[in-house]
Amino acid sequence: MAERTKLSRRNFWVIAINSTSTFVLSYFLVFFTNHFIKIMMTAVFKYPISFTYDTIFFLIRGYEWTHDSVRLIYSAGPVLVLVLGIISLMVYYSFSAESGWFKIIFIWFSLHAFNFVFSGLSIGNIFTYGVGHVFNWMYLHDTAKMLVALVGFFGLLISAFVLTRPLVLSGNSYFIGLDERNKPFFIMSQIVVPFIIGSAINVLFFLPTIPVQEEYSWVVLAVLLLIISVRINKIEPLDYGETDEVSVRLSWPVLLFTILFLLSLRFGFAERISISW
């Protein structure tokens, strides 16, 4: 029979580091999926571009933009990210009964994907950034733009409610159940601390300039995780039932892979790379 996990400082930081590494890795998988899909879509219209790790420069004149090019280039990434976020959540549920902790990357990926898409509908709409370019070219009236922003708002709320249960179930990676004894420990180590440290790492990655959506989406993400944490804190004690022997171990391979992945992207694409299709 599995033993209770000790609520020690050592176990707290092992769980936090494991969760933070997957939090950061999944965020950049979402970000660069959109980034490189946008680059690929420019090939359809033969637009010459140059790009770095965070910005795409379109080497064309304003009149060369068309409604079709704006719609495809700026909407293809968010649509794919949303689809991948849904698939990631489905994949998580297929592994949810397993005790391995790495499955939380699927939850973080879904959370970042939903936040990217739905906050993009609101933030992009306001600042005409990202997918907001599509709405600008559609010449939407204020009422229509407000409806788009509301879709983004309710999409975020639904995301918080949908992802609460997966995060609760992820506790079986380290615990045989959740109760009043270990629930605060779980929330802080698996959710709150990874968000704080992960957000700081992501901001440092983009310095000295931060893309508009990334500059504001962390506030939205904080609200989502606050809603999720409050809902988890209110659930009844939960027994994960029959489970394998649980243990708290630091995953050095994932941690090192995440570090190398970020460094290769940050410095590999630090200088402009030009493409003429």
Image (spheres, rainbow, N blue to C red):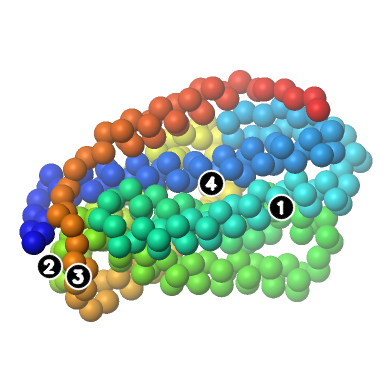
Residue type (three-letter) at the residue carrying disc 3: Gly
In the rendered structure, which disc, 1 or 4, sits on the residue that comes first in sequence?
A: 4
**Residue at (16% x, 54% y) in the render:** 246
Q: How far, Cα to Cα, is label 1 from label 2? A: 46 Å
How far from the left and from the top, in percent, is residue 78?
64, 53
The residue closer to the viewer here, 234 or 174, is 174
Within 10 Å of the Cα at label 3, are there few (<14), some (14-19), or many (20+) other Cα atoms? few
Quarter-wise, where is residue 242 in the image? bottom left
Secondary structure of residue under mark 1: helix
**Residue at (91% x, 41% y) in the render:** 63
Residue, disc 2: 181
Residue, disc 1: 75
The mark found on residue 30 in the picture is 4
Q: How far, Cα to Cα, is label 2 from label 3? A: 17 Å
**Residue at (27% x, 76% y) in the render:** 234
How far from the left and from the top, in percent, is residue 5?
11, 56
In the rendered structure, which disc, 2 or 3, sits on the residue that comes first in sequence?
A: 2
Secondary structure of residue under mark 2: loop
| Contact check, label 4 and label 2, Cβ < 8 Å | no
How far from the left and from the top, in percent, is residue 254?
33, 37
Residue 50 visible in rendering? yes
Residue, disc 3: 241
In the rendered structure, which disc, 1 or 2, sits on the residue that comes first in sequence?
A: 1
Within 10 Å of the Cα at label 1, are there few (<14), some (14-19), or many (20+) other Cα atoms? many
Residue 4 visible in rendering? no
